[in-house]
Image: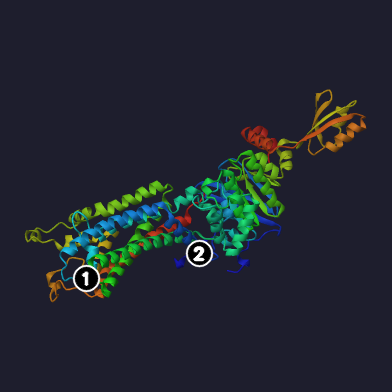
Amino acid sequence: MPATSRIRRRHPGGRVMRREGSPFQGLGTVAVKELADHLSSARMLVLEWLIVLTALAALYGAIDSLRQNTAEDPFLLLRLFTVDRAPLPSFVAILGFLIPLMAIGLGFDAINGEHNRRTLSRVLAQPIYRDALLMGKFLAGLATLAISLAALWLLVIGLGLVFLGVPPGGEEIARSLAFLVIAIFYAGVWLALAMLLSIVFRSPATAALVALGVWLFLTVLWPMLAPALAQAIAPPDPRYAALGLQTPETAIWAQTLARLSPNHLFGEAMLAVLSPTTRSLGPVFLEQLRGAVMGAPLPFGQSLLIAWPQTVGLIAGTIVLFVAGYVVFQRQEIRA
Amino acid sequence: MSEADSQVGTKADDFVIVARYLTKRYGEACAVDGINFDIARGEVFGLLGPNGAGKTTTILMMLGLTDISSGKVGVLGYDPARAPLQVKRRVGYLPDSVGFYDNLTADENLAYTAKLMGLSRTERARRIAAALARVGLSDVAGRRVATFSRGMRQRLGLAEIIVKQAEIAILDEPTSGLDPQATLEFLGLIGELKAEGVTVLLSSHMLDQVQRVCNRVALFQAGRIVLMGAVADLARQVLGAGFVVEVEADGPGLARRLATIAGVTNVETLAEDRFRMTADRDVRPDAARAVVAANGSLRRLSVDEPSLEAIYARYFQDQAAPSRGARHAA
């Protein structure tokens, strides 16, 4: 938030004035302390193990099925992320489900926890602005998530090397790095949401419950609700139905609505980045595919272009939620 | 922004806190209603009053931790709404029932806030060790705060103010919930701060303690300061007379002689040789002189200091009965 240094307050006299000093003073101190807290906390340990174990199970399934039919796939390593074997979903699908849980776990008591421990007023009585505290906590949470995801990423690459015995190519590494970056932003959305709720609700239990409610709604209910809503908004045309096709309008509505969920955005971006043959994330007319070599992989840059809007959506979501929390926190009474 | 621009005009340099028509409104409700006060350097100033009277809100406004609705307050010449960092660099704050990070040691807790104060590593280590020694927590510096008693936490909070080398220490209910021994120790530490020239603002409803350490007090009620001044002055204002002197002596016509001393408003004869005088000043020397002049033998001469508790009780009693209250209107 570089703009915060220019925040203006209106004085009772009506004069607009600037506040003195840097909003970033103390930012590093807060971030380092919070990072140390996160990395050593029991909560973090539990979440890490939950993710690692589930992800390993998914990977095991993927490795097993990949070994049995080692096709001439130029992107064998990427298949590790996306291949699923019933009843386990793919590694990416599991992450899409569990990253929010981890982010919520790190953020749901960020501010109200300080309130309840009665440390907030003591810390804010030091020569720092509230900006530093909030930003420091957010950055520390994001860094924790980034460290965990990077460790997980290394684990996948390592396991791929050991079990598949195929050295990954440069493009595979690049694509899987893109996966890592997008996953961190995806975690950022949920971390910002959890922190916003920790500011709004005084009780960490309420904040956690609301955050988990939103998480379940967006990951479980919304994928079912979006098509239903789309059909209500744009009823399917019977002529398309007779041909066994989706009505374009309905399909577009369904997709637009589904994209309101960060989960869907993450899923689409992953599809584009990790499955190089993905050419489009929305419905396309056959005519638009004229001249396309079906099944041929796109260059990395083109795949990134396809995933770019989704990635921007995730970044924007993070920023919007963080700013909302920031605005509420600036005006909040800090007395216990 | 220039330094001078952020200064609030203080009447004299020796006032470190100057509040003028300071007001805080929450919607319709007025938490602090146009209060005025000046606090001199090196003074111990007590904020008294029932819960919800606006003491903590006043403190938070002085620290720039809550917005001021109208009026202004200057702390060490700075406006906390505009230059909060300057204020917070110089003012130490011990909140009501202060909290620490339980998973960190006393040392680490102080190190965190010392880092936020912007102290260098060596300076930090030096000041923290010295502060912990002063509040008597050196032995437990490496222990997690989770194991600390309430008294230890309060002392740790005071250590933080010492680490900051604050010019003003604001202590919100520092002794509530402490056992008598811990309270005594804490009041001793406040006395040490005062001796070093630190201005101390003490909010409390433990009246006898406030009386013991404060130079002046302000009594808050429903967001206003209804009484302010030294305890003796308040006693005169509210109780009518400030001093009750008991004399145990014999001598002819002593009661009459005692009654003629200037400033004595009433003499009660408790027993043949015991008298209780009510006066607006400490009349012990005059009483002794009177006994000697009457050729009596003086056995005991004691003074009941006017108690803040009595002032407090009487003030609110008068509020409840307005007809009597008019007599003592502040």
Q: Residue furthest left?
A: A242
Q: Earlier in the sequence, mark 2 or mark 1?
A: 2
Q: Nearer the viewer, residue B205 or B262?
A: B205
Three-letter residue code for mark 1: Phe
Three-letter residue code for mark 2: Pro
| Way the structure is coloured | rainbow
Estimate the x, y position of residue B259 in percent, counting from the top left: 84, 31
Q: Nearer the viewer, residue A77 or B271?
A: A77
Could you tell me which residue is drawn at 56 percent across and 44 percent down? B149
**Tag 1, which secondary structure?**
loop
Q: Residue furthest top?
A: B272
Chain of the residue under the numbered disc 1 shown in the image: A
Residue B109: mark in rendering: none
Could you tell me which residue is drawn at 63 percent across and 67 percent down? B4
| Residue denoted by label 2 | A23
Q: Work out how far the residue at label 2 is from the one at label 1, CA to CA, in angstroms.
A: 46 Å
| Residue denoted by label 1 | A75
Estimate the x, y position of residue A238 in percent, counting from the top left: 9, 58
Which image quadrant for residue B82? bottom right
Height in image: B221 above or below B91?
Answer: above
Could you tell me which residue is drawn at 11 percent across and 59 percent down? A237
Chain of the residue under the numbered disc 2 shown in the image: A
Q: Residue furthest bottom?
A: A291
Height in image: B178 above or below A261?
Answer: above
Q: Quadrant of the N terminus of chain A?
A: bottom left
- Side (left or right) of B55 relative to A103: right
- Residue B3 in sight in this render: yes
